[in-house]
Image: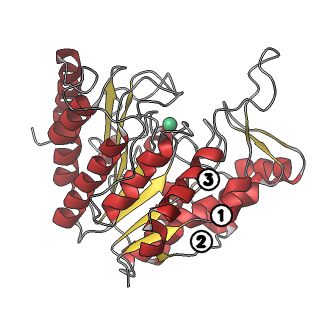
Amino acid sequence: MSRVGFVTADAYFGHESFVDFGPDVEPGAQLETPEPRKRLLRLLTKTGAVDACEPIATMALTRADLERVHTREYLDAFERLSAGPGGELGDYAGFGHGSYEIAVLSAGGVTAAATAVWRNDVERAFALVRPPGHHAEPDRARGYCLLANIPIAVQHLRAHHELGRVAIIDWDVHHGNGAQRIYYSDPETLTVSVHQEELYPVDSGFITEVGEGPATGTNVNIPLPAGCGMGAYRDAFSRLVEPTVRHFRPDLLIVACGYDPGLLDPSSQMAVPARGFGEFTRRMMMLADELCGGRLVVAQEGGYSPLHSPFCGTAVVHALLGWEHLPVDPNPADDDAPEQRLHPWQAEAVTAAMEAARKSGALPR
Ligand SMILES: [Zn+2]
């Protein structure tokens, strides 16, 4: 049996995001569409990665599963609008008819992946779900995210399978505001977000947001300046992400995996090549091996380039499988290219975040 679980469902590709950009942008010109994920699934099928993984079925979640994270009022409104033509319940988070059921299935996909890993049915798992979840807050949708997929999975495991300490590592280029808000006063959940500074949401993701009360030191933000490639990301992982997770000692590691730090992403200004996402994944595998019996869940979040993001996702899944080879990257980038080198202002941003983490207790003082 394969030790890597893989979740996906046809329904995920039927969900339509909708953002009204005003009268000058023709309807249908959306950033978040099914196409990048469809292409990822086709590429993973072509490389043999899907066949090499253990298929995991999505889990049917109950309303009680959702209410561990979201308010009843929000869920009622979402269900009602989704039964009609759709609507919008937050910024940049419009949806169409039937999206409620698909969003529940998306959260159910991450929950199924996390359950399989926690029960040791597989060692690691990848959840190719849609819509994404890391911006969703208890009482509102945000940034294409309708339900908080990862927190719903975590709270399900805590309710049914005695899960204890969890570390959520979010490398999507946008701030992981959802998990931050949901777990801001929970000392059992470490939330670490590496993102482009003041991108989205513009008013969160700062180094001063460190958790509160007994959870002080369990929220770590690493806002990086625009233009970072592998040099800056390696610096952030080595000096801050990994030491923080080691210091916290989780029982389970979950990655909020976006490909939008990718060098062709239309929603950001970072420069991570496709192979970089494989490297991030291998680093998380080593950390999981060291700290929590290898238990690692990777959940799909953003990434909007139909050309580039399938290669980024393939690098992630191949890494999970322990495969070295990758399909030919249409945009390879050498480590010594200017956008890949570590520049002083990037190292300074990591140092500032480290100092905040030391002060909060996220890192040893
Ligand atoms: Zn994103």
Which residue position holds label 3? Answer: 38
Q: Are marks 2 and 1 in contact (CB under 8 Å)?
A: yes
Amino acid marked by disc 2: Thr
Residue sitting at x 61%, y 53%: 38
Q: CA distance from mark 3 to mark 1?
A: 17 Å
Q: Nearer the viewer, residue 333 or 178?
A: 333
* Residue 90 relative to residue 321: left or right: right
Count of numbered tags: 3
Q: Quadrant of the N terminus?
A: bottom left
In the displayed structure, 98 sits above or below 222; it is: below
In the displayed structure, 113 sits above or below 187; it is: below
In the displayed structure, 346 sits above or below 124; it is: above
Amino acid marked by disc 3: Lys
Residue sitting at x 58%, y 51%: 39
- The figure's colour scheme reads secondary structure
| N-term-proximal mark, 3 vs 1 | 3
**Between marks 2 and 3 in the image, the one whose residue lies nearer the viewer:** 3
Residue 266: percent from left, percent from top:
53, 27
Which residue position holds label 1? Answer: 105
Q: Nearer the viewer, residue 213 or 84?
A: 84
* Residue 317 relative to residue 90: left or right: left
Q: Does residue 5 appear in this view?
A: yes
